[in-house]
Image (cartoon, rainbow, N blue to C red):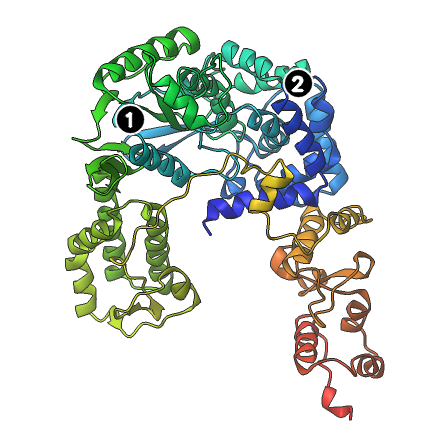
Amino acid sequence: MTEQNMMKRKVLRNNEYYGQQETLDELYKNSKEGRYFNKLYELIIDEDNIMKAYRNIKKNTGSKTKGVNGHTIKYLEKMSKDKLINIVRQRLKNYKPNPVRRAFIPKVNGKQRPLGIPTIEDRLIQRCILQILEPICEGKFHNSSFGFRPNRSTHHAIARCQHLINHSKNHFVVDVDIKGFFDNVNHGKLLKQLWTIGIRDKKVISIISKMLKAEIVGEGSPTKGVPQGGILSPLLGNIVLNELDWWISNQWETKSTNHDYTHPSSKIKALKSTKLKPCYIVRYADDFKIFTNSRTNAKKLFMATKFWLKDRLSLEISDEKSKITNLRKNGSDFLGIRIRAVKKGTAQLGYVSQSKIDPKRKFKIVEVYKSKLKDLKSSPSMDKAKRLNGFTLGIHNYYKVATDVSQDFNDIMHLIYGKYKGLKKRNIIVAKGTRNEVFKSFYKGYKGSLDRCCNITLYPISYMHFKKPTQIHPEFTPYTEIGRKRIHNKLTIITPIELERLRNGNFGKRSIEYVDNRISRFVGQNGKCFITGMRLETEEVHCHHKIPVKYGGNDAYDNLIIVHKDIHKLIHSINNSKILQSSIYWTVKSKQKFNQLRKHANLEPIDFKSVA
């Protein structure tokens, strides 16, 4: 499972941790039915929503990035639950965002992308708003939009492109490049789009308006654009371009007709007898393609889209980067993959999709490998070998949906083999690697020899096979019971009632980190006692610090463990006879675990052999 998918499932679990699933489902349902929402502020400042927002941002790597006030997630972790909730509520009463810190990150083309980094407090507030607005927006978004949406990914976008190539004759692609999309979003238009989509709580719209105008350090207050780096920005970007999705779709795919067709294919067949232009959009954030069936139609769609973006959204396009491609003759790059249509006699329509790594991305991959191998040569270490493996696994997982991926990675290995061979000559890379569980999971079927570096088995760079991406089902959403059944598999043995009880305990002055990680541990252990493996009722749950706070222990996830409340007392007990009496029916493994926890707590282990 990719890190992105793990995060999406984590968000789904968090909806139930904090008892919001029913509320979010209702928002989604009402949005689908075309209703308006004018009482969202109360949901945003709800205690459960704030706690869920904290949980969702704390595991993101961005939570460790400092804003202008120097605070990171560690600043929030030490607060009590009540203090954290109060800060959010007080800030939102008369919201004034802190200034945004400007930062730059490199782009694939060598240029730099400007980011706007809000303070951790403002990121928490943005997350609170996102959680309530997302189900409403999901009820309105088009199915052909795949970027920054729950349970959707780049692979789903590529799958849609491949499907259109394989199952239609729409082999002409219109590529439209919007100039600096996120930097040029019209604020007034965006706020109107929020209103149109059904978000009609004026206080919430006012807060979002203030966020958009937050001062950027050294640049002043912006008059347009949404800051890349803000938690709410991807959703706002999708709201802006959702209008484009439906404008394209309503010209063909969702065109209103006088006759009600029982099946979409019947409707498409009827539309083909008209003079309408076939067109399908596939969009990932601000990167999109429009598929059609002829160059003439492609030219018309190109000009119409260019003028529509200018007139409707006040957005300019780059004429140099925008183009029309005949996929039967040339490839078109999308999300790092070059796609085209090639002849195949056995195909349904005579052509099938063929894809490979975008040559520019391929060159970049080779350069990264050369850099990592050079680094290993200068100072070999286990950490560097692990990072090399991490890079290999990451790009294999991303590009596996390209049909020619096997040839691509053979080419990559050929281009870096000189440096790789040099490390083998120096015995930095040696033979006889071992097949561990991760290897067996990701490289099933590999029969070749394995290499090692600093006792780390290296993943085979050249070994990768195409895995056909699957299209996403329209019902694949976390906001319906049917949708959750398709994606929900982690919380089946933990009931919502149990989570409700765990959340509502009396934690005194315990840190928010403790309150949150206690729930995580309970779910991670499937609700079972660490010592006995017995399924616990919520009133039996105690959370033990492996290293006690008085000895420098903290509330981090790895320092907490869930045990039965009576066993928790035994761990800290000095009454050996009581411990021995209570542990008569424990297994050897349970006794070993018990002594392990005693040792961490600087307590004498128990001699269980003294009991007959």
Q: Mark 1 points at which residue?
A: 170
Residue 27 horizontal/vertical position (percent) = 66, 27
Q: Mark 2 points at which residue?
A: 35
Is residue 306 shown above or below 585?
above
Horizontal placement of 399 versus 374: left or right? right
Is residue 543 shown above or below 312?
below
As shown in the figure, which amino acid type bears the numbered disc 1?
Answer: Asn
**170 vs 424, nearest the viewer:** 170
Number of numbered discs on residues: 2
Q: How crowded is mark 1: few (under 14 residues within 10 Å), some or many (20 or more)?
A: many
Q: Nearer the viewer, mark 2 or mark 1?
A: 1
Task: State the image quarter where residue 283 is shown.
Answer: top left
Task: State the image quarter where residue 326 is shown.
Answer: top left
Residue 491 horizontal/vertical position (percent) = 65, 52
Task: State the image quarter where residue 16 is shown.
Answer: top right
Is residue 560 shown above or below 14?
below
Q: Residue at x 54, y 28 (%)?
A: 232
Horizontal placement of 277 versus 342: left or right? right
As shown in the figure, which amino acid type bears the numbered disc 2?
Answer: Arg
Considering the numbered disc 2 on the image, is that residue within a helix, a strand or a loop? loop
